[in-house]
Amino acid sequence: MQIQDMRSYIHSVVEIDADDISNDVLNRFLGEAYDLVVYSEKRWPWYEVSTTFTTASGTSDYTLATIGASVTNGLREIGALRTDSQVLEYIGRDEGDATYPLNSSGNGEPFRWSYWEEKVRMYPTPSSAETIYVRGWKSPTAFGAGSVDGTSPSDFPEPFHILFATYGIARAYEQQEDLEMANSYHMMFTRELDNLRSRYLDAPAPQPVVLNGTSARRWMSSVNLPGRLRYSWE
């Protein structure tokens, strides 16, 4: 749905027109819905991105803007960093600064990192230019206030589009001082958001679960793989 389609849907349900609530106000209601859904989860799967950046010799700190320079809208959060040879270990800033003081000459290939003030600090300080591979989540595209007709919430799958309109209906009823209907549609919005969150944040299971066998684990003990955390249901 494009933003004008959402407004038309709100008009038809609430039985109002642009004279009752302006298009600008409805766009702002839809923007509220969009932001509520965007920031209800940090790690929606459609925000997943992979990118790279290059270290500089003698430079420890790299801003999030620098790391995500090639990502549309920039990076919102970093999931993991690696070099060509290894995955970098995340550690706390205090531990990193105590173990690798910046006034020391301990430069080399980084194998640890910390994050503070939207900056990544490499440990030890890189001694040369090296490609760092990044996995993370991008920042969302703006939607709502200021959006022109023909704009859609492109980051989200279509089942979410009617959800934004549902929230807009709740806000429109609230503006029309029909609090009972406003509450009803707001509950509908919350319920459907929970359903969609469960659907789209369901963890993948690349290994089938074996039932009624000698083991119900996804990873059989005979598989030659490194150890990992075991969950209670395995």
Image (cartoon, rainbow, N blue to C red):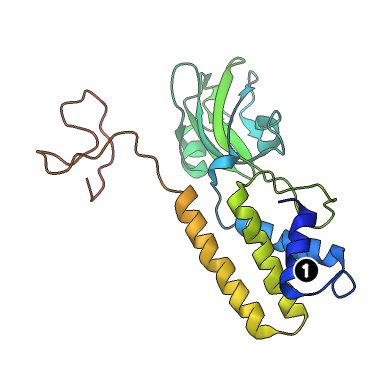
Label 1, residues with CA under 10 Å away: few <14, some 14-19, many ≥20: some
Tell me the quarter of the picture where residue 31 sits: bottom right
Say which of 119 and 216 sits in front: 216
Task: Please report the residue visible at 19 percent of the width from the left and 32 percent of the height from the top.
Answer: 220
Task: Please report the residue visible at 60 percent of the width from the left and 14 percent of the height from the top.
Answer: 128
Please state if 124 lies on the left or on the right of 147 as rendered.
left
Q: Does 106 appear above or below 137? A: above
Please state if 154 lies on the left or on the right of 97 as rendered.
right
Tell me the quarter of the picture where residue 69 sits: top right
Q: Position of residue 120 (x, y in %)?
A: 59, 35
Q: Position of residue 134 (x, y in %)?
A: 56, 29
Say which of 30 and 106 sits in front: 30
| Location of mark 1 (residue) | 11
Say which of 57 and 104 sits in front: 57
Quarter of the image with the C terminus is top left
Secondary structure at numbered mark 1: helix
Task: Please report the residue visible at 81 percent of the width from the left and 47 percent of the height from the top.
Answer: 150
Residue extending furthest left?
214
Q: How many marks?
A: 1
Q: Position of residue 113 (x, y in %)?
A: 51, 33
Q: Does 167 appear above or below 120? A: below
Q: Position of residue 227 (x, y in %)?
A: 25, 32
Say which of 212 and 62 sits in front: 212
Q: Does 194 appear above or below 156? A: below
Q: Does 100 appear above or below 7? A: above
Q: Is residue 2 visible?
A: yes
Task: Please report the residue visible at 46 percent of the width from the left and 51 percent of the height from the top.
Answer: 199
Residue extending furthest right?
19
Q: Is residue 104 visible?
A: no
Q: Which kind of residue does numbered mark 1 sit on?
A: His
